[in-house]
């Protein structure tokens, strides 16, 4: 270890760093043989003690936080009308966006049930048609193909109508239940 | 410091609660930063108030791109620099301009032991280039924490160490 390296190691140790583990005893060995670096070390130690003694921060008064929070309240009270209007407009815009997202989510939810209902309707239609055919065949009352098709179409129409009416009814019921809440929130947002 | 609690409050739009936590966490650090920049504890106290007030105003717009401490320290440094510039002391505190001749009063409490030596050290500190003076002052105010000093000044830790060693060498030459 030369003097430049020793000085750097001394400064590191004054900063509070751990000694270089890869060179154990190297600094001590250098210091024992170098009076110049010993003097540097002693001078830096004295300087460190003096800096620690001199650089002590003053304390904040206990009232600091209360004063600060008081100033934030004053700043609120002093808010200009245009700032109030801008803030209100921003809140309303945010709320309208959240309402729109709510409507989209409700529509997606209602729409997601349609395939299942349609599938159920078709399965029921097929079952009804099959049962009718079996009954007619078993009673030896031969029906004309047109009449059978007519019955099947009527059954399909009934099930199809149910498939459309049920989700619409669910969505309408949901909207009716939420409407007062939504209107109330809108009123609160406008008044904020 | 754990910023997650403050971030959670901000995510829940609990601005007031988040601000109170920020005040608890940062008031002393901002004050020490202001002390190191201004060397005037009364002014530093006012600037800490002003910086936190600016944080409060800007808090609803905090977007989380920078860490909370980085964001708060930037606001705090800018608050100090703006005030010092207003007081026509800009040239004595620039983080970029290395040379200066500061003459303001000490911001620091006079310690009881080694009072005479402490005064000598303060006089020597005033003769350092600004960046070195700022780094070594804040390093000691922050209880010798490289990381906290670097965060407060917006510098890499390596730069803090380099400036610190340079300041120590210069002080050793200047000290009586």
Image: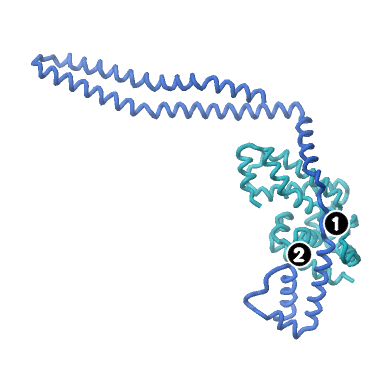
Chain colours: A blue, B cyan
Q: Is the same chain shared between marks 1 and 2?
A: yes
Dot placed on the residue nearer the N-terminal end, 1 or 2: 1
Read off the residue under disc 2: B163
Chain for disc number 1: B
Read off the residue under disc 1: B108
Of badges 1 and 2, nearer the viewer stands 1
Characterize the local packing of mark 1: few (<14), some (14-19) or many (20 or more) Cα atoms within 10 angstroms: many
- Of helix, strand and loop, which one carries label 1? loop
The image position of residue A135, as x and y in percent, is 14, 18
Viewer-closest of A151 and B41: B41
Left or right, residue B2 beside residue B166 = left
Characterize the local packing of mark 2: few (<14), some (14-19) or many (20 or more) Cα atoms within 10 angstroms: some
- Of helix, strand and loop, which one carries label 2? helix
The image position of residue A142, as x and y in percent, is 10, 15
| Residue at the image position 18 percent from the left and 22 percent from the top | A130
Distance in Å between CA atoms under marks 1 and 2 = 21 Å
Chain for disc number 2: B
The image position of residue A53, as x and y in percent, is 83, 64
User: Quadrant of the rendered structure where residue A134 is?
Assistant: top left
| Residue at the image position 71 percent from the left and 57 percent from the top | B148
Viewer-closest of B101 and B5: B5
């Amino acid at each position: 270890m030369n003097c430049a390296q020793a000085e750097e190691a001394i400064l590191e140790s004054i900063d509070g760093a751990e000694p270089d583990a890869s060179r154990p005893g190297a600094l001590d060995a250098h210091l024992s043989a170098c009076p110049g670096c010993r003097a540097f070390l002693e001078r830096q130690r004295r300087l460190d003690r003096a800096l620690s003694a001199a650089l002590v921060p003053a304390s904040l008064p206990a009232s600091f936080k209360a004063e600060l929070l008081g100033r934030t309240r004053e700043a609120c009270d002093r808010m200009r009308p245009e700032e109030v209007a801008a803030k209100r407009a921003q809140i309303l815009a945010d709320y309208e966006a959240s309402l729109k997202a709510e409507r989209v989510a409700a529509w997606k939810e209602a729409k997601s049930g349609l395939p299942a209902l349609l599938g159920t309707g078709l399965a029921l239609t097929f079952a009804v048609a099959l049962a009718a055919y079996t009954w007619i065949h078993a009673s030896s009352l031969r029906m004309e193909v047109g009449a059978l098709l007519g019955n099947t179409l009527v059954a399909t129409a009934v099930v199809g109508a149910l498939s459309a009416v049920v989700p619409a009814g669910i969505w309408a019921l949901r909207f009716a239940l939420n409407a007062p809440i939504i209107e109330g929130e809108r009123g609160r947002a406008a008044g904020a | 410091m754990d910023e997650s609690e403050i971030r959670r409050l901000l995510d829940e739009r609990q601005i007031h609660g988040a601000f109170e936590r920020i005040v608890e966490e940062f008031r002393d650090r901002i004050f020490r930063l202001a002390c190191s920049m201004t060397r005037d504890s009364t002014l530093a106290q006012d600037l800490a108030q002003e910086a936190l007030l600016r944080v409060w105003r800007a808090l609803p717009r905090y977007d989380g791109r920078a860490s909370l401490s980085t964001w708060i320290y930037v606001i705090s440094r800018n608050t100090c620099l703006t005030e010092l510039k207003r007081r026509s002391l800009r040239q004595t505190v620039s983080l970029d301009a290395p040379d200066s001749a500061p003459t303001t009063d000490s911001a620091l409490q006079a310690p009881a032991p080694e009072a005479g030596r402490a005064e000598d050290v303060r006089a020597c500190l005033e003769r350092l280039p600004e960046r070195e003076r700022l780094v070594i002052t804040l390093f000691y105010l922050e209880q010798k924490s490289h990381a906290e000093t670097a965060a407060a000044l917006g510098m890499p830790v390596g730069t803090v160490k380099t400036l610190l060693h340079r300041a120590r060498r210069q002080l050793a030459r200047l000290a009586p």
